[in-house]
Amino acid sequence: MRTHFHSLPLLLFTLSLLLGQSKPDPDPIQDYCIADNTNTFFINGVPCINPKQASSSHFVTSALSKSGNTSSNKFGFSVTSTNTVNLPGLNTLGLVLVRVDIEGNGIVPPHSHPRASEVTTCLKGQLLVGFIDTMNRVFTQNLKPGESFVFPKGLIHFLFNRDSKQPALALSGLNSQNPGVQLASVATFASKPPIPDPILKKAFQISDKELDMMRRNLGG
Ligand SMILES: *[C@@H]1O[C@H](CO)[C@@H](O)[C@H](O)[C@H]1NC(C)=O
């Protein structure tokens, strides 16, 4: 009896940990919560409009129909995401869909999403994708159209268009309405204000000159 008494809380605790592992954003407590983008106060998410004013147009978007401008950065990629502005009906549903365009030999540089796992499907082209786990092991795969790869939540990952001429196209689903993104290189070398020189020089084992070059190249 005594052991049972003690093991029940432990069992519940273990179960709650196991279940907690797969939780996306908090569950909605109504059918939908169409984003009211006119509000200026902040809650965890976006406030909803009166459900009586809901219409089909709140649940549809053509945001992902056009390719993005892959020349607007040095890496040769463009990411277009659904969000609570272009698709107000996704508010509180715990997901977004993202269109990724990558020019020939372009990359989506190593980056992470602090609030979401991501599954990427290659629609066009030849993609080399991969992520790095917390033991610094790297897992990579060449994707052909129709093939998918998953990036676990928060881990650094990248995409590379292996074809030097043809653009590549991928569609990614993420299990947060606001996954967040940090490009490792840009966050480190082009932060505002800059991270103090001694920290970056020591962390990356580089000279003043090399630090200046990295900052300049990354727009810092
Ligand atoms: C794409 O971005 C580049 C660099 O910012 C710009 O020069 C070019 O006009 C843009 N192209 C389109 C179609 O908007």
Image: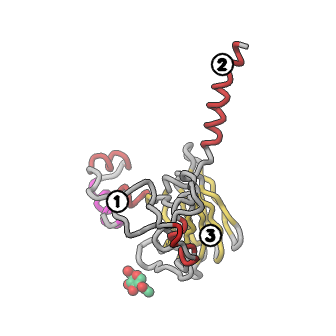
Name above or below for residue 62 compared with residue 134.
below
Q: Secondary structure at mark 1?
A: loop
- Region in magenta: 208-218
Rendered position, 47 above or below 122 = above
Q: Residues within 10 Å of mark 3 (few under 14, many from 20)?
A: many
Along the line of sight, the residue nearer the viewer: 171 or 46: 46
In the rendering, at what x and y percent does residue 54 appear? 54, 72
Query: Relative to 58, is 18 on the left or the right?
Result: right
For image coordinates 44% across by 79% down, the residue present is 71
Find out whether residue 128 is within the magenta segment.
no
Q: Residue furthest front?
A: 52
Q: Tell me the tag on residue 6.
A: 2
Q: Which numbered disc, 2 or 3, marks the residue closer to the eye?
A: 2
Q: CA distance from mark 2 to mark 1?
A: 46 Å
Q: Is residue 77 visible?
A: no
Disc sitting over residue 41 in the figure: 1
In this orientation, which residue lies closer to the viewer: 144 or 112? 112
